[in-house]
Image (cartoon, helix red, strand yellow):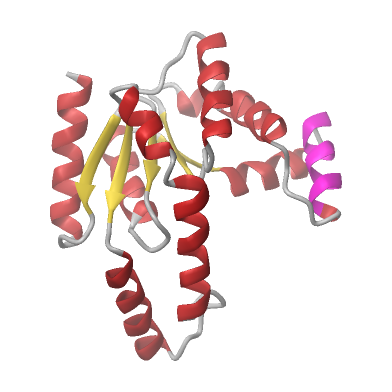
Amino acid sequence: MNLIFLGPPGAGKGTQAGRVEAAHGLVQLSTGDMLRAAVADGSVIGRQAEEIMERGDLVPDDVVVTIIADRITHPDCANGFILDGFPRTVGQAEALDAMLAEKGMKLHAVIEIRVDDAILVERIRTRIAETGGSRADDSEETLKNRLDVYHAQTAPLIPYYQSQGKLLVVDGMKPVDDVSRDIEEKIGLATA
């Protein structure tokens, strides 16, 4: 089973993807982790990515898709994978679809964890109050900027995957365990 988790920053994608990973024997793949691993491995594509990152530029979609294409062939991905943090744009989604088709693979579902922006801002305020703002990204302004980027670049993936019949929407404003149950129920229906 191959999945993507979508949702704004702070929606709980990482938490929920981790639970699905453990429950189904899948591998949660973060593009950042894959890029760092490719660089550490010293592969041709890893060296190319390293040069780009050292310049401070974004790694182009074709390089990221090549790294994902390699990573999903590893034995630990035999049961499937969860992409977290990719795709971020419709162009990336199209490149991912083409790569999967070339490999005779498919995406089974895209799980959107839907949370109101106002709730996310309130969550960050609470976390700042509880932790004293110890995390680098713990600021209301940073979150608002990240939400703007999400709505401009990543939210267009919602109608893209909805038109393919792959979008599963869960209410991320429920308690964490309820969100997990909803995800499991929707995954079961989608893959039955």
Q: Percent from the top left, x then y, of residue 91?
A: 58, 32
Quadrant location of residue 15? Answer: bottom left
The vertical placement of 33 against 3, above or below, is below
Q: Percent from the top left, x then y, of residue 80?
A: 40, 26
Taking the spot 21% from the left edge, 46% from the top edge, the residue there is 170
Would you say residue 47 is visible in this rendering?
yes
The vertical placement of 42 against 127, above or below, is above
Would you say residue 74 is visible in this rendering?
no
Taking the spot 16% from the left edge, 56% from the top edge, the residue there is 177
Comparing 43 with 166, the one in front is: 166
Which image quarter holds the C terminus?
Answer: top left
Residue 39 placement, left or right of 87: right
- Secondary structure predominantly adopted by residues drawn in magenta: helix
Span of residues in magenta: 44-53
Q: Percent from the top left, x then y, of residue 57?
A: 78, 51
Q: Percent from the top left, x then y, of residue 141?
A: 50, 78
Residue 129 belongs to magenta span = no
The vertical placement of 126 against 185, above or below, is below
Which image quarter holds the N terminus?
Answer: top left
Taking the spot 51% from the left edge, 30% from the top edge, the residue there is 93
